Image: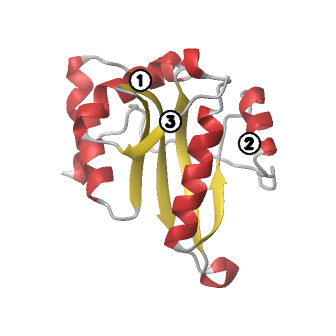
Amino acid sequence: MPISVFFRRASAQDLSPIVALYLEDTRGRTRESLDALLWDRYTKAFKAIDQDPRQLLVVGMVEDLLVATCQLTLIPSLTHQGGLRLQIEGVHVKNEYQGRTIGRQMLAWAFEYGQEKGAVMAQLTTHKSRKDAQRFYHQLGFEASHIGMKRFLKESIPLDMKEFT
């Protein structure tokens, strides 16, 4: 059943629920942690995102409960005649709220944000094992037009955030 969600910029108080949301995910459990020893890294990363005018960390709220998040990045590009791109990353919906149109509403909100900023395209990556996510993104008009590749530059994950201090 559809549910109404309010989307807004994330605040520092949302950081713990966002990381907890990442931990609900099978892949997230292998790379995220609520360990206090790592909290400084998350805090530094949040501050870097929050202070960058081309970045927006979004949360979806149902009343006072954080149920969804994603990170939006505006990327200037020379391709597509100097077109601005909207990169969508870290899309997560709380497990018990999946299937209730929250992801669809969040991406519609992201598309509107991108259009308001002048973006000519939205792009994202999803892990090749996430078949349900791929079907979802196809339904929203995304095409698997490229092969995405990643290479970790440091062994430790999350990355050392010293460059953001």
Q: Nearer the viewer, residue 12 or 1?
A: 1
Task: State the SS at label 2.
Answer: helix
The image position of residue 152, as x and y in percent, is: 50, 41
Q: Position of residue 90 (x, y in %)?
A: 51, 39
Q: Which residue is mark 3?
A: 5
Query: Relative to residue 41, is residue 8 depicted above or below?
Result: below
User: Residue 32 — which label?
Assistant: 1
Query: Label 3 amino acid?
Result: Val
45 on left or right of 72: left
Label 3 packing within 10 angstroms: few (<14), some (14-19), many (20+): many
Residue 9 image offset from top left, x and y in percent: 36, 48
Mark 2 residue type: Tyr
Check disc 1 and give the amino acid type.
Answer: Glu
Q: CA distance from mark 1 to mark 3?
A: 25 Å
Which quadrant is the N terminus positioned in?
A: top right
- Is disc 1 placed on a helix, strand or loop? loop
State whether residue 46 appears in this view. yes
Instruction: Using the image, determine if residue 39 lies above or below residue 134.
Output: above
Q: Which residue is mark 2?
A: 137
Q: Secondary structure at mark 3?
A: loop
